Image (cartoon, rainbow, N blue to C red):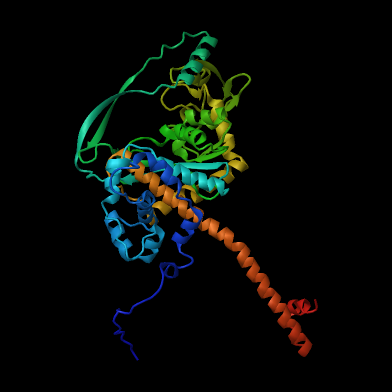
Amino acid sequence: MISINKNIQSEILITTMEEIVPENSLFRKIDKYIDFTFIYDEVKDLYCENNGRPSIDPVVLFKLVFIQALDGIKSMRRTCEKIKVDAEYRWFLGIPFGEDTPHFSTFSKNYERRFKGTDIFENIFINIVKQAQKYGMLNDEFFMDSTHRKANANKNKYEDQIVEQIKKRKLDLEEEINEERKRIGKKPFDFKDEIEKKHIKVSKTDSESGYYHRDNKEKGFMYLEHRTVNGKCNIITDAYVTKGNLHDSVVCTERLDYQRNKLNLNINKVGLDSGYDTYDIKKYFEDNNIFGVIQYRSYGQGNTEIRKWQFDYLKEEDVYVCPKMGIILPYKNIDKNGYKKYYDRKQCEGCPYQKQCCEKSKFRTIRRLVCEEVNERARERRLSLEGKELFKKRKTTVERSFGDSKQNHGYRYTLFKGVEKNQAYTHLICAAQNMKNISIKRASIDAKPYIFTKIIEIFTKLIKISKNHVKENPTFFSNVGFVYSLSLY
């Protein structure tokens, strides 16, 4: 028989919001484990103490953004509409049903008139990370990566521009090259600033976004978020927003220094993908005593059948030995890019494997960076057992963190224009994600003693029941040896 519900929802309920909100609510956990009172100290200089109308509680203002981020609501307008009828949201904000909720434009107006240009958003993010640190949810393992977010801009509306900029010089490498030139009796190079020209696309809608184009990925105007995640509990320790046309490796060392100095983090191990495979980053790891692991990156070696890695390098003699004929290729020269060249024209001209070994020239030239030892030590770290175990965690930490942000917290698209505003909201979204992570894990830890106590109570009752049954019928538990043995205590 089909039942048709004809009830009219007009009953009067006498209850409290405390009773309506479920005990296992995420917002209950956040309210219990996250301290929001620090926000008052952060914003006190932005409010007048003795003049003007009473303001909305600043904690309520930021909680509006946290609610939007935690539940992945697309707009503040929709968030404020849901707050009007949602008891869970009202309980979290401390607004009873008899009071009006904030208008959707409240936070945006406060941002433009009060919070814009301040470091309040960064300080909130940092404070949440420090609360995670107090809970013991950070260790010395960190993983960094970047993800692109679609800018609020039409990819077909842009201007072509040619930008001139000074190419970044590697001063340490230049000094090492000239020292090597002096050692072998060559004239040092005169390194100068080089101006390079780049053809870029500038959006007419959002000029601060960058045109993102990589193989097998969607092209368009994007922002990049360079994120660092801790390996213990997936706490986000840094979230830095740049234009979409900036390479990942450019800001790596800068952001690691930021976390060491600003957050006083103990960074001993770092896992990175192949996009960070640069000399500067590897040298930074060694200078700061960091066990850095970078994913393998393959480089093209032309059409030669005999590869460079097949040649034996004799470190003491500083020569390469041919794997086929045993020809010794001595060190001859070093170029301006820091590559030491090893070759022997006379020996290679009569070699029967010349076609397999040489691609264009009549003799084989092996190139070796002047700082190749740094690359070799990085390779040893990557191939070590500790390095392999560290890199395995990358897909379950930073990659998972990005997936959670995009799937659950509305992180696929940017709702705002400009790097500054997107950076501010990114700090709040990542702070909300950290809050969720902290509260869920802390609630799980606190629940374990309760569950263990319940198990002991049930187990004790089982023993008492088994004793009674054994007294009445000694063969009752004859087929269950374990329970029967307990009854004999």
Q: Position of residue 80 (x, y in %)?
A: 30, 58
Q: Is residue 392 left or right of residue 162?
A: right
From the viewer's perspective, is residue 318 above or below residue 417?
Answer: above
- Quarter-wise, where is residue 479 in the image? bottom right
Q: Is residue 12 above or below residue 156?
A: below
| Residue drawn at the location 37% of the way across and 53% of the way down | 60
Q: Quadrant of residue 75?
A: bottom left
Q: Is residue 159 left or right of residue 321?
A: left
In which quarter of the view is residue 466 placed? bottom right
* Above or below 407: residue 167: above
Residue 271 appears at what percent x and percent y?
52, 41
Q: Position of residue 108 (x, y in %)?
A: 28, 47
Residue in front for this viewpoint, 383 or 61: 61
Residue 92 appears in view = yes
Query: Which one is nearer the viewer's eye here, 177 or 88?
Result: 88
Q: Position of residue 49 (x, y in %)?
A: 35, 42
Q: Where does the N terminus fall, quadrant-wise?
A: bottom left
Q: Quadrant of the C terminus?
A: bottom right
